[in-house]
Amino acid sequence: MKSCELVRSRVASVYMFIKSLQIAFIGLVVFTATAWAGNSVLQGIVKDPKGQPVKGADIRIEAKDGSKLSKSVKTDASGHYISDPLPVGTYRITLIVNGAVKASINNTKTKLGEPTQLNFELKATSPSQASAPAKKAKHYVWVPPTTGSHLGGRWVEVNDDGTADTTGTNKVKKIRGDALGRFESDTGATGAISQPGRP
């Protein structure tokens, strides 16, 4: 009688253990499916102008939702790349080859649970594009307000060498008070501003 109860007890404990394993396995499958469903990957192929794969190109992935998520992946020998799992969202994708930005796509949307395919095919540059001089960039520096002035600071355009650009409207000549007095007496000008209808 005791051996029969002992066998029943052991069978019940084995049964409970198997049920526990089944529940744990189902929970793991549901958790994995839920985690995968919230993510996507970005993949594609990069080819040069001759249709050959580009090895070692950088694909920079930056989130556009303000989360500051930023990743970078490289292409393999066949020009293929694939990102780590990404949250579903909108991304800026930048292609960099040999340190130069070749393409940038601002609003790439990833899809729920499936890879987003984004291929790059580089175009050949014509001889005129290759020899064309680069556009001159505008450079600005912030000039803080002058001591004693009620005017705020301003941005001033400067040349590539850092000197002030004198070709635009930024030509301002500073003079001392005694020079201003001589100017007023020589020209008959006063510091007053005339308003319409007033002498």
Image (cartoon, rainbow, N blue to C red):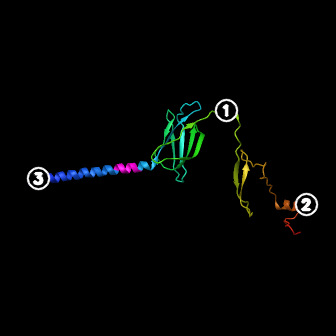
Q: Find numbered disc 2 in the image and state the secondary structure of the residue it sits on.
A: helix
Number of marks in picture: 3
Is 85 rendered above or below residue 131? below
Q: Magenta stretch: dominant SS?
A: helix
In magenta, the rendered stretch is: 28-34
Task: For the residues labelled 2 and 1, say whether their Cβ atoms are less than 8 Å apart.
Answer: no
Along the viewing direction, whichever of 84 and 27 lies nearer the viewer: 27
Instruction: State the residue position of label 3.
Output: 4
Rate crowding at label 1 as few (under 14), some (14 to 19) or many (20 or more) other CA atoms within 10 Å.
Answer: few
Which residue type carries mark 2? Answer: Thr
Q: Please identify the quarter of the rendering in which residue 9 is found.
A: bottom left
**Viewer-side label of 3, 2:** 3
| Left or right side of 86 for 18 | left
Amino acid at circle 1:
Ser
Tell me how far mark 3 sits from mark 2, CA to CA: 125 Å
Residue 88 image offset from top left, x and y in percent: 49, 49
Of the image marks 2 and 1, the number of the one nearer the N terminus: 1
Q: Which residue lies under the disc numbered 1?
A: 126
The Cα atoms of the two marked residues, 2 and 1, are separated by 60 Å
Residue at point 19% right, 53% down? Answer: 12
- Decide which of tag 3 and tag 2 comes sooner along the chain: 3
Report whether 154 appears left or right of 41: right
- What residue sits 28% from the left and 50% below the top? 22
What's under tag 3, amino acid-wise? Cys
- Residue on which disc 2 sits: 187
